[in-house]
Image: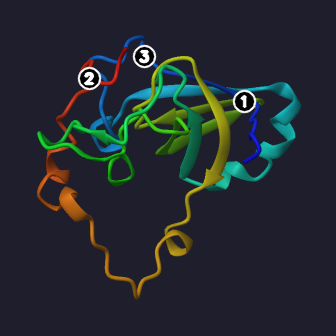
């Protein structure tokens, strides 16, 4: 299989200098502010973005080293398959978060509800459109998260995925 290469389009700036103690999902990051410093060459791509309240950020989990196919996620004591979790130690260390867009000023985006490590390389931005991201006719099943998702708001990261 051929290798795929991505170039960061910018950097995500947040108050989280260390992985330990960070919120594990945006639901636990209510009100936490951050910024995106988009590379100037991509600033033209921000046209019309201010009309959206939420963004999907796709980023490189730059502090994740290696991967495990079975991990003990933050919300459980049982080992789960990596693809049934949101754990950072993945074959391709790609993260996603839905954040609020507060303001666009040139190539700087002010965002909130940020659960991302400071200095994280940003790969892409997509507008969050609930009408497109979920078919209203679909029944949602969330597997082992069913009895755990309510704990995510108060759960903080520890060092379990650090080398």
Residue identifier under label 1: 8
Horizontal and vertical percent position of residue 67:
43, 32
Residue 83 left/right relative to 150 = right
Residue identifier under label 3: 15
**Residue found 56% across the figure and 49% down from its top:** 55
Q: Which of the marked residues, 3 or 1, is nearer the chain's N terminus? A: 1
Is disc 3 placed on a helix, strand or loop?
loop
> How many residues crowd mark 2 within 10 Å: few (<14), some (14–19), many (20+)?
few
User: Which image quarter: residue 120?
Assistant: top right
2 vs 3, front mark: 2
User: With respect to residue 6, does 138 lie above or below?
Assistant: below
Q: CA distance from mark 2 to mark 3?
A: 20 Å
Q: CA distance from mark 3 to mark 1?
A: 20 Å
> How many residues crowd mark 3 within 10 Å: few (<14), some (14–19), many (20+)?
some
- Asked whether 56 or 59 is in front, the reply is 59
Pointers 3 and 1 in contact (CB under 8 A)?
A: no
**Residue found 19% across the figure and 34% down from its top:** 155
Q: Which of the marked residues, 2 or 3, is nearer the chain's N terminus? A: 3
> How many residues crowd mark 1 within 10 Å: few (<14), some (14–19), many (20+)?
some
- Asked whether 48 or 77 is in front, the reply is 77
1 vs 2, front mark: 2
Residue identifier under label 2: 160
Is disc 1 placed on a helix, strand or loop?
loop
User: Which image quarter: residue 140?
Assistant: bottom left
Q: Which of the marked residues, 1 or 2, is nearer the chain's N terminus? A: 1
Residue 62 left/right relative to 87 = right
Horizontal and vertical percent position of residue 157:
26, 26
Is disc 2 placed on a helix, strand or loop?
loop
Q: Quadrant of the C terminus?
A: top left
**Residue found 49% across the figure and 68% down from its top:** 130
Count the labels in the image: 3
Horizontal and vertical percent position of residue 105:
71, 31
């Amino acid at each position: 299989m051929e290798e795929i290469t991505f170039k960061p389009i910018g950097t995500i700036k947040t108050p989280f200098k260390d992985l330990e103690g960070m919120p594990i999902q945006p639901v636990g990051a209510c009100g936490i502010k951050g910024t995106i410093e988009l590379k100037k060459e991509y600033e033209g791509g921000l046209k019309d973005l201010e009309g959206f309240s939420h963004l999907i950020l796709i980023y490189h989990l730059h502090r994740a080293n290696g991967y495990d196919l079975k991990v003990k996620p933050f919300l459980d004591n049982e080992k789960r398959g990596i693809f049934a979790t949101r754990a950072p130690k993945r074959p391709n260390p790609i993260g996603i978060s839905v954040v609020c867009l507060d303001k666009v000023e040139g190539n700087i985006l002010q965002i909130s509800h940020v659960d991302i490590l400071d200095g994280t390389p940003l790969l892409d931005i997509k507008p969050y459109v609930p009408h497109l991201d979920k078919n209203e006719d679909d029944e949602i099943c969330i597997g082992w998260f069913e009895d755990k998702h309510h704990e995510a708001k108060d759960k903080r990261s520890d060092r379990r995925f650090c080398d």
